[in-house]
Image (cartoon, helix red, strand yellow):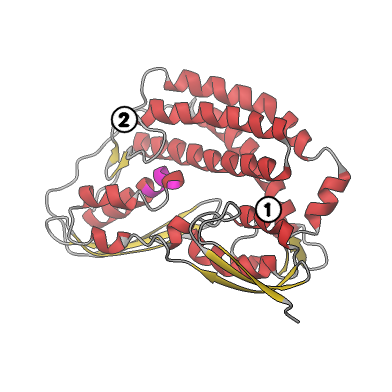
């Protein structure tokens, strides 16, 4: 039985962006939920039509600034498939390094927000210190901390800048040494995890595409606490990505960092996908013979994640709403594109 209705948004510190939640409450428990998006709709897909692919990329990478490197990679691979260009080993290596760094940046941002929500100030500042140094590396690589426009169709804007490899190796060594301390601070008390293990519980979370693999593999009686499993998954992924990067940076294959794009191309429709920690990005596009976009559609992880908001919040206390929303990692800018 609904006793009262509470509306939150479109601007609120609990929300990940301009959106609206209409909560049907029974006591302090959420029993019904209506979500609203579209408060900052930018029409990105329609703005790209008719533009040359190089001009359209600037618009596309602004869908989600935190994932700009991943978006540039996905877009570049889609254009290359449309014009029939195959890139060499060094381009593939540069893209993989950029993608891994982007994923690591996203996980550190999530962990810092969770530490802030939980009120663990020393942990919050410790993670922020590592993330700020990582953003300095992004700036050294691409010239910008956000909206990088570094990965292009055919390769990268330029090769690794001087000093980048040495500084990245130093950062990875420092972070891997500090990782166990960070993990220990998150897992320091059983009472802390008892609370998280009963927060954001859903049935068969895999169907929504937002529950991590580790959560699905460790379900308790068919139920998954997304908050706890996502936290543990993110901690482990930070360690894995850092270890992978430490190995990748030593490979350093030879070759050019960018391949030329033909002046004309056949009028074909292509589809490219990119799997990330948050889910799958998919792009479908058609270029005309002058390389202008005739059609363009994109689907983002948040298109699916937004369907999981109510299953994760149903029956939960309203005081846990910020933690649960944070763990879902929904990006409103992706939905309001």
Residue 237 visible (yes or no): no
Per the model, the C-alpha gap separating discs 2 and 1 is: 46 Å
Image spot of residue 329 (x, y percent):
57, 54
Residue 279: give x, y in percent of width and height: 53, 57
Packing grade of label 1 (10 A; few <14, some 14-19, many >=20) is: many
Q: Position of residue 155 (x, y in %)?
A: 30, 39
Q: Residue at x 67, y 41 (%)?
A: 116
The quadrant holding residue 43 is bottom left
Extent of the magenta region: 67-71
Identify which residue is drawn at 16% across, 55% down.
Answer: 291
Q: Quadrant of residue 50?
A: bottom left
298 lies left or right of 133: left
- Which numbered disc covers residue 255? 2
Taking 242 as reference, is 281 above or below it? below
Mark closest to the chain's N terminus, 2 or 1: 2
Q: Is residue 62 left or right of residue 277?
A: left
Above or below 27: residue 80: above
* Residue projecting furthest to the bottom: 1
Left or right for 157, reference 204: left
Q: Where's the C terminus, which quadrant?
A: bottom left
Could you tell me what secondary structure mostly forms the magenta stretch? Answer: helix
4 is within the stretch colored magenta: no
Read off the residue under disc 1.
Answer: 323
At x 43% / y 31%, what residue is drawn? 138
The verdict on residue 68 being magenta is yes
Q: Is residue 82 left or right of residue 305?
A: left
Query: Which label lies toward us, 2 or 1?
Result: 1
Query: Could you tell me residue 69's position as x and y percent?
Result: 40, 42
Decide which of 110, 233 is in the foreground and name it.
110
Q: Nearer the viewer, residue 15 or 142?
A: 15
Residue 197 visible in the current orientation: yes
Task: Find out whether the residues at labels 2 and 1 contact each other: C-beta distance under 8 Å.
Answer: no
């Amino acid at each position: 039985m609904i006793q009262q209705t509470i509306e939150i948004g479109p601007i609120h510190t609990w929300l990940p962006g301009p959106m609206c939640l209409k909560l049907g409450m029974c006591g302090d428990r959420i029993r019904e939920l209506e979500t609203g998006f579209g408060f900052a709709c930018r029409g990105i897909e329609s703005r790209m039509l008719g533009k040359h692919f190089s001009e359209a990329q600037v618009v596309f990478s602004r869908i989600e600034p935190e994932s700009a490197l991943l978006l540039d990679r996905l877009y570049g691979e889609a254009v290359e498939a449309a014009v029939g260009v195959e890139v060499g080993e060094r381009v593939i290596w540069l893209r993989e390094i950029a993608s891994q760094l982007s994923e690591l940046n996203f996980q550190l941002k999530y962990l810092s927000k969770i530490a802030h929500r939980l009120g663990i100030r020393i942990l919050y500042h410790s993670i922020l210190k590592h993330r700020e140094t990582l953003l300095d590396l992004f700036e050294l690589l691409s010239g910008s901390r956000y909206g990088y426009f570094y990965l292009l169709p055919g390769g990268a804007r330029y090769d690794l800048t001087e000093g980048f490899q040495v500084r990245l190796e130093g950062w990875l060594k420092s972070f891997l040494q500090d990782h166990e301390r960070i993990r220990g601070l998150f897992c320091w008390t059983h009472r802390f995890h008892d609370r998280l293990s009963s927060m954001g519980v859903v049935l068969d979370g895999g169907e929504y595409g937002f529950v991590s693999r580790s959560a699905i593999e460790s379900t308790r009686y068919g139920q998954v606490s997304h908050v706890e499993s996502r936290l543990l998954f993110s901690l482990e992924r930070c360690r894995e990505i850092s270890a992978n990067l430490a190995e990748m940076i030593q490979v350093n294959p030879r070759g050019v960092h960018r391949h030329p794009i033909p002046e004309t191309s056949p009028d074909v429709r292509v589809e490219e996908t990119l799997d990330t920690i948050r889910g799958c990005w998919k792009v479908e596009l058609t270029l005309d013979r002058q390389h202008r976009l005739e059609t363009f559609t994109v689907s983002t992880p948040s298109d699916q994640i937004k369907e999981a908001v109510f299953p994760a919040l149903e029956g939960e206390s309203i005081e846990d709403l910020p933690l649960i929303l944070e763990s879902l990692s929904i990006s409103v800018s992706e939905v309001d594109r």
